[in-house]
Each structure stands twice: as structure tokens, then as C-alpha cells.
Amino acid sequence: MSNQGCIKCGSTDAGKKDVAMTGAGLAKMLDVQNNKFTVVYCKNCGYSEFYNQNASKAGNIFDFFFGG
């Protein structure tokens, strides 16, 4: 499966980071970071996509980002 590249600039140089964010309501007031995402970003132009960690366990996350 070949990478098609970033949808903004065509680069195939990407990175990823795991982030956690607060939700709404009581979780926000108590600063409970219960929403976990993996961010895949283009190292060339900075375009980013967030993937829910629970939903993105199947396959290589870079395949989703590059549309492969």
C-alpha cells in the first residue's frame, strides 16, 4: 500500500503525538482529561488530523492520514 501524501502539500513526512483533553460539564470543572486522541501531523506544512484512540486501534494510523 503506497502513501499518497498529505492532502494539503503532498509530503509523506508525518509524525504523531498522543493528547488528552477534558470533556464538558463536571469533567471540565474537575479538569479530568478523559478524551484521548492521537494527532497525526504533516511535518512539512503542519496539517493535522485527530483520531480517537479507542476507534483507531485497527491498522496503521498513518494509512488513515495518507488515505491509503
Image (cartoon, grey):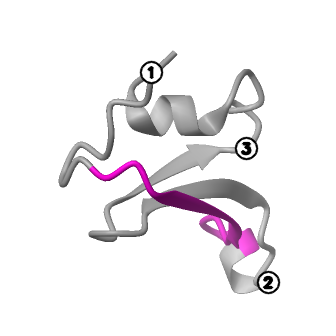
- In the image, 1 versus 21, the foreground residue is 1
Q: Quadrant of residue 15?
A: bottom right
Magenta segment boundaries in residue numbering: 11-27
- The mark closer to the camera, 1 or 2, is 1
Q: Residues within 10 Å of mark 3 (few under 14, many from 20)?
A: some
Q: Earlier in the sequence, mark 3 or mark 2?
A: 2
Q: Work out whether 7 lies above or below 35.
A: above
Residue under label 3, please give it.
53
**Residue kind at label 3, given as amino acid type:** Gln
Q: Residue visible at 31% across and 53% down?
A: 11
Residue 53 at x, y = what percent?
A: 73, 44
Label 1 element class: loop
Q: Mark 2 = which residue?
A: 30
The amino acid type, in three-letter code, at marker 1 is Gly
Element type at marker 2? loop
Question: Is residue 67 located in the magenta-colored stretch of the structure?
Answer: no
Q: Earlier in the sequence, mark 3 or mark 1?
A: 3
Residue 38 circle label: none
- The amino acid type of the residue labelled 2 equals Leu
Q: What SS does tag 3 mark?
A: loop
Alpha carbon separation for disc pair 1 and 2: 39 Å
Asked if labels 2 and 1 touch by Cβ distance under 8 angstroms, the answer is no
Q: Position of residue 31 (x, y in %)?
A: 76, 83
Per the image, the residue denoted by label 1 is 68
